[in-house]
Amino acid sequence: MDMSYQIAVGRPPQSTPSLATHAEGQARIASAGGALDALGTTVTVRKDVEIYSQGDAARHCYQIVSGCVRTVKLMEDGRRQVGEFLLPGDWFGCEALEEHDFAAEAVTPVVLRRFPRHALETLAERDARLGRLLFAIVARELRRARGQVVALGRKTACERIAEFLLQMTQRMPKDKTGAIALPMSRTDMADHLGLTIETVCRTLAVLRRAGAISLSRANLLVRDPVALLAVGCATRH
Amino acid sequence: MDMSYQIAVGRPPQSTPSLATHAEGQARIASAGGALDALGTTVTVRKDVEIYSQGDAARHCYQIVSGCVRTVKLMEDGRRQVGEFLLPGDWFGCEALEEHDFAAEAVTPVVLRRFPRHALETLAERDARLGRLLFAIVARELRRARGQVVALGRKTACERIAEFLLQMTQRMPKDKTGAIALPMSRTDMADHLGLTIETVCRTLAVLRRAGAISLSRANLLVRDPVALLAVGCATRH
DNA sequence: CGCGCTCTTGACAAGGATCAACACTAGTGG
DNA sequence: CCACTAGTGTTGATCCTTGTCAAGAGCGCG
């Protein structure tokens, strides 16, 4: 079987099986062969620099090699919504119709593979596997966006944060203690979860005091995944 | 040019040009010809009956002929989120990966065209235009979901309702006075907008008193689209 | 060492939720 | 045809989660 195009669902299977269905894996393409490689160019972007703006014509789409990217919608009055955080292996920008509706910015220094959309489309029409891959990427994005809709529409601050921490723990590489380094600031988290920085801080403090996590700045260790999963956030008060 | 597959963006061009970009048109397929017609079967569903459940294997996808459909996510404790309302011409269920993450239910009596997904996929691999159509449908869904994320994450109750009313006015057929008949209940609206019924009622009352709309039960007339667009919802109090 | 970040915590305000009562409408059956 | 009932919508009173405003703590960097 030709593996030059493949979708890996989830990271290398690691721990926490109860969350397996949450592992909204990244679609990636094995670098081995494929006409795709010839189309891409490698780009590096410094921290906090914009990759494209909202409203830009959608000429390229991207796959992350290393680093973390956020998608951002800015309202005229300055309110900000972070759509999602993207990690190595993740694709973004593929789904744009004519123009990008969100901007993309580097959360950390980032290395990307950049592909011209029209070339990708042309190739996809000759190679059905690539077509399926692109479709799966967008379908996965849609599922993730809908999960966020449920979180923002119907979950409490505590539930949103617990869910977010679990997701990040699934997606990020762990050190030997099982801890991860959150790449984004409190502001980014707040704007992703539809909260304020202060609420994020306070809720993290509650979870820490409850013994569910330990956290100092960026360094996060989920001590009690079950408690986080169960978050009616027992400490209702 | 072969028109058997086409994406019509927006309804027959009707009024309110300032919102043209909002008219997140429905992707539809002209009934004239196309191998697609042979694949579809017509289905009717009574009001409030489920078309598929969340968790169901995704065997079919659908296009609405008449009526209104909602997609619904139900949490274990009964909290409910309505993903979107779908109207004639709209597709749904195409984006599912393995199983549907939301249920689909008839808001009103509904007539559907139902297509087996695997047959659609097979056909799409031979006919690039159908492939592009399916991709565009999912991309459009994704854009809509992201708009909802911004609304739920960063907009006030009043802004969400104003935006919703404008969208519905764009998408629904108007009578000679320019009014529309909202197909869904207050509960559905509330669960779509991440609010309670009471807040929906009260906010509608505020907008009515401000002269921006007139509304009795389901009958809605937007009297002052500019005011609705501008909603900082002046009546902050 | 001190400046400028981001993060944290506290006090208070407010938007929206909850609880409760009532109004309106459509449907049902006598 | 009317009365009754159940469901949906509306409005009021009150509560609570989260936002706002403010001050301080911790950390990185020149």
Image (cartoon, coloured by chain):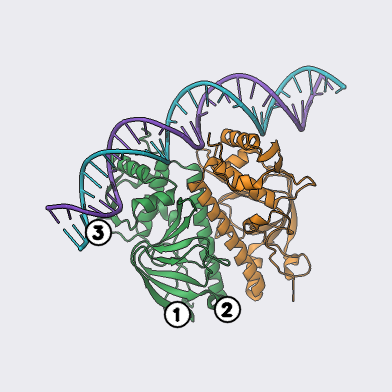
Chain colours: A green, B orange, C purple, D cyan
Q: Nearer the viewer, residue B4 or B203?
A: B203
Q: Chain of mark 1?
A: A
* Quadrant of the drawing holding the C terminus of chain A: top left
Q: Position of residue A94 (x, y in %)?
A: 52, 68
- The residue shown at (64%, 55%) is B19
Task: Report if the CB atoms under discs 1 and 3 are less than 8 Å apart.
Answer: no
User: For this view, does A74 lie left or right of residue B58?
Assistant: left
Can residue A134 be seen in this snapshot?
A: yes
- The residue shown at (57%, 44%) is B231
Q: Position of residue D21 (x, y in %)?
A: 36, 39
Mark 1 or mark 2: name the one nearer the start of the chain. Answer: 1
Q: Position of residue A6 (x, y in %)?
A: 47, 71
Give the structural element (helix, strand or loop) at label 3.
loop
Crowdedness of circle 2 by 10 Å Cα count: few (<14), some, many (20+)? few
Q: Nearer the viewer, residue A43 or B18?
A: B18
Residue A15 figure quarter: bottom left
- The residue shown at (73%, 49%) is B67
Three-letter code, disc 3: Lys
Residue that badge 3 annotates: A176
User: For this view, does D5 lie left or right of residue C21?
Assistant: right
Can residue A222 be seen in this snapshot?
A: no
Instruction: Please check whether the numbered discs 1 and 3 fall on a single chain.
Output: yes
Residue that badge 1 annotates: A37
Q: How many marks?
A: 3
Q: Chain of mark 3?
A: A
Residue D2 figure quarter: top right
Give the structural element (helix, strand or loop) at label 1.
helix
Three-letter code, disc 2: Thr
Three-letter code, disc 1: Asp
Residue that badge 2 annotates: A122
Mark 2 or mark 3: name the one nearer the start of the chain. Answer: 2
Q: Nearer the viewer, mark 2 or mark 3?
A: 2
